[in-house]
Image (cartoon, grey):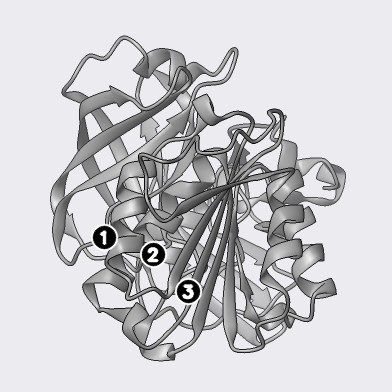
Amino acid sequence: MRITVQSKTGEVAFVCGDGELILHAGLRQGLSLPYECATGTCGTCRARVAAGEVDVRWHEAPGGARLKPEKGDVLMCQTRARSDCVLKVPSDIVALEQRPVLRRGLIRNIRALTSDVREFEVHLSTPMTFEAGQFVVIETRDFAGGRAYSMVNFGSETDRISLVLKRKPGGRFSDWLSDGRDDRDVSVFGPLGRAVFRPQEGRNVVCIAGGSGIAGMMSILACALQADYFRDHRGSVFFGVRTLQDAFYLEPLARYVAAAHGNLHVAVALSDEAVAAGSLSEFPGLRLAGGLVHAVAAKTMGSDVDAIAYVAGPPVMVDAAIRGLIAGGTPPRDIRYDKFS
C-alpha cells in the first residue's frame, strides 16, 4: 500500500507492507515520522487519516487518550493500512540518517539483577549498529503489542544486545520472561530514539535515571569510556531507586568512575530509605544521597552551561527532571529523552 503523509514541510510518500505498522514502514524507509515510545503510550505519533482504510490494533492505547477517532485520528505505531492512505501529521518530516530495521532475535541469558529487575540478551538475526542511548521495540507472537527497551551495551555491528526489564504486576511480557527459558523467538525493530550520545559533540554529560532507566545511560557510559571521553570532559550520573536493595549495576558504575580520570561522578539517590554512612564502601567512587533523583540532581549539579543532559525513567520522574533542569538553566535544546514506559 502507498502511504502519503502531508506535513508542515510538504508531502512525502512511502510503501507500507501488508500487515506492517505505518510508523515502522515510514521509519525503515528513512522518514522521521514523529514518535517517542513507538509502543502506544506517549501519543507523539498521532496522525489523521484523510483518505483510505486502516486497522487499529490497540484502541485502548494510553497515548490515544486525546485523539478524536471520529475525525480519523490514529497512532501510527498502532495502525496498519488496508488500502492506499493519505495521513495528515502535525509536525515536520525530514530524512533520517539512520534507518531502523525489523530483525528476528532469540532471548538468552536471563539473569536477576534485583527482586524485580531482569537483564536479558537478544541474539540478533543480523548485526545492528546503534548510537549510545537508543532503544528497540520487542514483540513476541505469544501476545500482541510491542515493548520498548534501551540497550545497555554499546558496539558497532553487534549481533547481540543487552536489555533491562522491570517486572510489574500483571505485566504480560515480564511474566512471560520470568520463567527464564532461553531461545524464545521475538521480533526486534530498531534502533530507535533521539536521546543519543555522540562523542564528537564534545560536551559535558549529565545523566538522570530512575530505576530501569539506567539502561540507556550504561550504554552512554560504555561509549564514552571506549572513546576515553572523560579525559577532557566531565560527567555526572544520578541513579534513583527506592532502597539500596533496588540498586543494580553498581560494580560496572564503580569501574567506569575508576577509569574516568576523576571526571565522572555517580550518585545513587534513595527515595524511600535513609542513607547509611559507608553503605557503598565496596563500590569506591560511588556515593549515596537521600531523596528523589531529580531533586538530588538539581541540588548537586548546579548549572553546567556546557552540558548535555540525558533523562530516562518513569514518565513522572522524567517530567520532574526536565522541569528541574530547565529551572537550573539548562536550555531545552540540551535535554535529551525518549519518553516510554
Mark 2 and mark 3: Cα distance apart in space: 25 Å
Locate residue 211, reporting x and y percent: 55, 39
Q: Amino acid at mark 2?
A: Ile
The answer to whether 160 is drawn above or below residue 60 in the figure is below
Locate residue 13, reporting x and y percent: 50, 74
Q: Residue placed at 35% from the left, 52% from the top?
A: 254
Q: Which mark is residue 31?
A: 3
Mark 1 and mark 2: Cα distance apart in space: 8 Å
Q: Are marks 1 and 2 in contact (CB under 8 Å)?
A: yes
Q: Are marks 2 and 3 in contact (CB under 8 Å)?
A: no
Mark 3 and mark 1: Cα distance apart in space: 25 Å
Q: Secondary structure at mark 2?
A: helix
Q: Earlier in the sequence, mark 2 or mark 3?
A: 3
Q: Which residue is mark 2?
A: 220
Q: Which residue is mark 1?
A: 154
The quadrant of the picture occupied by the N terminus is: bottom left
Q: Earlier in the sequence, mark 1 or mark 2?
A: 1
Q: Amino acid at mark 1?
A: Phe
The answer to whether 245 is drawn above or below residue 253 in the figure is above
The quadrant of the picture occupied by the C terminus is: top right
